[in-house]
Image: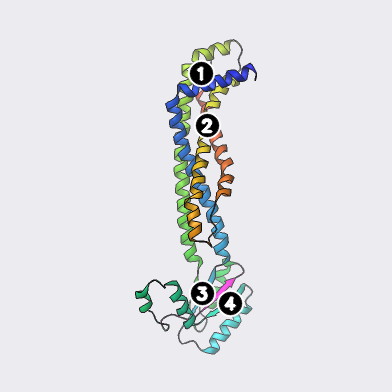
Amino acid sequence: MGARWRYLLAELGIGLRRNLLMTVATIVTFTVSLTLLGVGIMVQRQVDRVTDLFYGEVEVSIFLVDGITEGQRVSLESELREHPVVEEVMYESKEDAYEHFQEIFADNESLLDSVTPEILPASFRVKLHDPEQFAVIESQFAGYPGVDVVSDQREILDRFFALLGALRNGSLWIAAIQIVGAAALIFNTVRVTAFARREQTGIMKLVGATNWYIRLPFLLEGIVAGVVSALLAVGFLTLGAFTILQRIQEQVEFLPVVGLGDVLAVFPILVGVAVVIAAVSAFLSLRRFLAV
């Protein structure tokens, strides 16, 4: 190892030890911010994954009035099956709807006792090639003889995804605020270190050391703090993937849940953000001490 690298590593160690408390505070703040940033990215990945699954299975429900005639029902079914945007059509009679209701609310005896097959409407469950084409079906069949209501399952899903979106946005906003705080801590930590070594810096400039050579130990201090924070953040995300997310996957087997692979995919993003923020903060804090 060359003399220059030994000097840089020695200065790096001195700087980290000299401002140990501020370094620890920076790492803690940065870890929290990067963890929240990782959570926001993971939530977005989860939303994308669930959206692909659920929107692909979205059905349009066409509820029928009780007085619909057999001819009207057959005519409606025929037009639905021939419609170009329709992929699949399934008829659910009152009895079928009641059986389905009993399966869903099997643990709620009071609700089961209050509902009879006559109360539930017959319906057509229509799967579209493109769920975005719901408006085409609604406009054509909402006023069809024997049709009561045309309902789109996306209305329920959109509320669910809006909730996940709010969780994601909240995590990202809090992460952004925390990252600003971490950047300020790095800025102040490096500045205190640079102030303590201002005479040494001045001598180095006078003997011909370049600004970048002088800056490098300070930049490395910030970068080390950032990288350590990113590693800790990934550790927390991995712990969450093996505990909380794994339990969710066991309880809801059909739901695709983000896992360790997604954490590993987020890792370079967190490291990149940490390195950039730390390097920029350290760089800006040194400008006044290099004007010799």
Callout 4: SS: strand
Of pointers 2 and 4, the one earlier in the residue sequence: 4
Q: Name which quarter of the figure residue 207 lies in.
A: top right
Tell which of 66 and 239 is nearer to you.
Answer: 239
- In whole angstroms, how far apart are the C-alphas of marks 1 and 2? 18 Å
Q: Which mark is residue 278?
A: 2
The amino acid type, in three-letter code, at marker 2 is: Ala
Residue at 49 percent of width and 47 percent of height: 39
Which is closer to the viewer, label 1 or label 4?
4
Q: Which mark is residue 89?
A: 4
Other residues around mark 4 within 10 Å, as few (<14) / some (14–19) / many (≥20): some
Residue at 57 percent of width and 13 percent of height: 205
The amino acid type, in three-letter code, at marker 4 is: Val
Q: Is residue 196 magenta?
A: no
Of pointers 1 and 4, the one earlier in the residue sequence: 4
Callout 3: SS: strand
Of pointers 2 and 3, the one earlier in the residue sequence: 3
Of pointers 1 and 2, the one earlier in the residue sequence: 2
Q: How many marks?
A: 4
Q: Which contiguous range is marked in magenta? A: 119-129
Q: Which mark is residue 61?
A: 3
